[in-house]
Each structure stands twice: as C-alpha cells, then as structure tokens.
Image: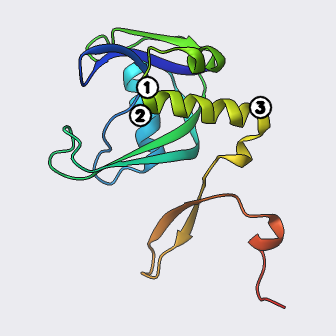
Amino acid sequence: MLTLFSDFILQLKNMWKFPGGLSEPGEDIGDTAVREVFEETGIKSEFRSLLSIRQQHTHPGAFGKSDMYIICRLKPYSFTINFCQRECLRCEWMDLSDLVKTENTTPITSRVARLLLYGYREGFDKIDLTVEELPAVYTGLFYKIYHKELPDSYKTMTGMD
C-alpha cells in the first residue's frame, strides 16, 4: 500500500497521483522523496530505492528546463495521514491492485502502480535501483550511484580470470 493524493493537475482534473515535488539545492534524491511525502501527507518514511525516471523536455512547470521526475520507493514508519490541504484535496492509503484498476489516475501513476505490484509479487530485486555511495576522484568528496544490485561475487571481485 502507498500514499496517494487526489489533486488537481495540469488540466484541472481530479486524479490520483503519488506525492512529489522539487529538490532543494544540494538535497539527495531520497531525502527529497522523504521530505515531500512528509510535507504533503504527514507520513514519516525511509528511502528504499529508485524505481524509475521520467524525462520530459517542454514541461510547463520546469522553468524552461528539461524535467527529470525521479520515482522512489519508500518504507513508511507512520501511517496516520495528516495531509496538506493547500496541496491536496484528499489523501488516503489505497491498495495497489485497486489503483491499477482505476481509470481516475495519471499515466505515470498507473505505470508506477504496476511496477510496484510486480515488485511486491515477484520481488523488488527485479525493479529496484539501489544506491551506493562511492569516493569521488576529488579527495574527501563522495557521490551516489544508482544501479541494479550486484551479486555478492561481483561486489568483491578484484580481477578477471
């Protein structure tokens, strides 16, 4: 189950969508997702993985830039909804199998619901992009890399035979 919003979007239609918003300068992807979900729903959560990325050029709300919409999977730590009435009309927990069947949703919400349902049924290892922090070439700096999980034998591999 995931938190969903009923909100007016683009054409002012009442449609279910997942929480979302803009990153603050210097804010990591997972931190943005956790913050936005809390601000919009009151639900405390933890970043688990990156599910997908939507790229769109000419997005009306992207300030004249290309838009990257990054979809994350979170684990909730609280379940009592206290949603932001300035941003949402309604907010509720909805079963993914019900969300997959609804026509009152955005195309991206429908696709992500199917991805999540597949992950629940077949294992999130089939869809998740995990995060790993690695040292940058600049002393004292680090970066995050998102990728499918490597098998243990490849994590410690030092050379090829």
Residue that carries the numbered disc 2 in the rendered image? 35
Q: Residue 38 carries which label?
A: 1
Q: Which amino acid does label 2 sit on?
A: Arg
Q: Count neighbours of disc 3 (C-alpha within 10 A) and say few if under 14, some if 14 to 19, many if 20 or more.
A: few
- Give the secondary structure at mark 2: helix
Q: What's the CA distance linking mark 3 and mark 2?
A: 28 Å
Pick the quarter of the image with the N terminus: top right
119 on left or right of 49: right
Looking at the image, which residue is at 60% across and 52% down?
129
Residue 75's x, y, as percent?
61, 32
Residue located 24% across and 16% down the image: 12
Contact between marks 1 and 2 (CB within 8 A): the answer is: yes
Q: Looking at the rendering, which quadrant does residue 36 occupy?
A: top left
Callout 1 amino acid: Phe
- Cα–Cα gap, marks 1 and 2: 5 Å
Residue 159 appears anywhere in the view: yes
Three-letter code for the amino acid on which mark 3 is drawn: Arg
Reply above or below: 42 against 37.
above
Let me know if residue 79 appears in the view: no
What residue sits right under mark 3 in the picture?
121
Residue pictured at 67% horizontal, 29% vertical: 117
Find residue 156 and report its image quarter.
bottom right
Element class at badge 1: helix
For label 2, count other residues whose C-alpha is less than 10 Å away and answer few (under 14), some (14-19) or many (20+).
Answer: some
- Name the secondary structure under disc 3: helix
Q: In percent of the image, x 48 and y 15: which residue is there?
A: 103
